[in-house]
Amino acid sequence: MALFPLAACLVSLSCLAPAQPPASTLQLTSHDTANRISSVVLTCEPTGGTHPKRDKACAVLASVNGDFSRINARHQACTLIYAPVDVTVVGTWHGKPVSFRTTYPNRCIADRDSDGVFAF
């Protein structure tokens, strides 16, 4: 009877494959004062989706384990023109739910403060 779990493992081959974390899929949306709405899908591990800079965006998110509040802003000059941009993110990061929402003073700052994640 002690060999049954081993036999089941070998028959299904489930014990031979390393555990893979679930893919991370996020829907990112921006909405500005000119009533422009942009939305992209970002998939990481494997990288994919409609985000124009998906490799960079996935690298940034991997460095903060999918926590948008921990993204470090990059050094980039932006104008001080106030044209607010609301951004939202919903989806999953390695199987855990993600929900993020914030308002940036303008698109340049959204791009800078998200290190390119909101550059779409």
Image: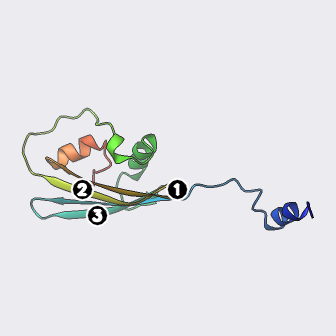
At 19% from the left and 56% from the top, the residue drawn is: 86
Quadrant where the C terminus is found in the figure:
bottom left
Q: Position of residue 58 (x, y in %)?
A: 43, 49
Q: Position of residue 112 (x, y in %)?
A: 25, 41
- Label 1: how many Cα within 10 Å (few below 14, some 14–19, many 20+): few
Q: Quadrant of residue 14?
A: bottom right
Q: Nearer the viewer, residue 30 or 79?
A: 30
Q: Is residue 117 left or right of residue 108?
A: right
Q: Which label is found at residue 87?
A: 2
| First reached walking from the N terminus: tag 1 or tag 2 | 1
Identity of the amino acid at label 1? Pro
Q: With 87 as the anchor, is 83 left or right in this view?
A: left
**Which residue position is annotated with label 3?**
39
Mark 3 neighbour density, 10 Å: few (under 14) some (14–19) many (20 or more): some
The residue that label 1 is drawn on is 46
Image height of 50 relative to 59, above or below: below
